[in-house]
Image (cartoon, rainbow, N blue to C red):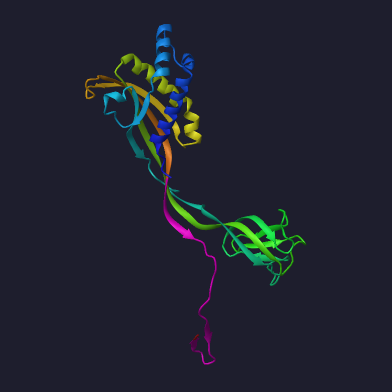
Amino acid sequence: MIPVIDDYLSDLIESKFKYLRKNPSHIEDIITLSPNKMKSLQAYISRQEVEVIKGFPIKPNQLPCIAILLGNENEEQGGLGDYSEDEDADIRTHTETLTVIESVGGKLAVPYVQLEYKPVVAIQQVFSQAVGQVLPEGHYYIDNERQSLVGFLSGLVEAGDEVAVTYSYRHVSEVSLDTMFEHNFRIEVWSNNADIVSQLYALTKWAVLSGRDDLVTQCGLYRQRLSGADLQPDTNLSPEFAYRRGLNFWCQADSSVPIQEIGYVSDVVINETIGFDTKGGDEHG
């Protein structure tokens, strides 16, 4: 999968600012300001919604805002192990009714059934029509995953009984191209007030830092680093004069792209035999 990091950052910052809007007193625990400026900022946050957008603001009424922009991204040099196989890419569930077979040919020493789809992953339920109940776990087991053989240990099931088996099986295995990217995003704070820009910048930094663990565990963004700088004011939002300060967010993330699906062999059918006559010639039949 390819991560959409814009969405991760946008959702994180929006949730943090919504929290501050409902709990403006918490700002005192985040940044240090003079008492008058702190009261002014708390009042501002509680009444003014700070919009989080993707891309540059194009209208004056979008100020103040936090703009998320892609700075650049680069693929790291590949190496061995760029390809991987996921056997659990497509696991499906199926139910079928089968007749229990008595052990023959030395396959199993107990009554068994052979499921239609292979290979089997797990048995969800076995219902015995002979006794009219679901068999408890431990009364059956998977003897051979690739042949989808299920054996029965309990006297509740005998050869000739009908059982309904619900099971999961692997339909295909997926081969993927795996690589790692370095991503650099700019999180820019825009406002027509220079003081508000610096204060919102500090709160934005808090929002990203406080959500760092979630970005790692839930989004797979590793080795995060932050840096920042003032940006040249924008005069294109006339009549507003927009001050800007940017937070640079750098991280590494894995990207995986499926390139091939491999189906499992479910059966083998022999449709040609080769024999030899007594004169040394071949006979095909």
Q: Residue at x 64, y 60 (%)?
A: 165
- Is 259 a magenta residue? yes
Q: Quadrant of residue 5?
A: top left
**194 or 246: nearer the eye?**
194
Span colored in magenta: 256-283
**256 or 21: nearer the eye?**
21
Is 270 situated above or below 134? Answer: below
In the image, taking residue 153 as reference, residue 214 lies left or right, namely left
Is 75 situated above or below 259? Answer: above
In the image, taking residue 165 as reference, residue 184 lies left or right, namely left
Q: Quadrant of residue 37?
A: top left
Is 103 situated above or below 51? Answer: below
List x then y, in percent, for residue 163.
68, 63
Q: Which residue is drawn at 42% across and 28% down?
A: 14
Q: Which residue is drawn at 47% across and 33% down?
A: 215
Residue farthest to the bottom, as pictured: 279
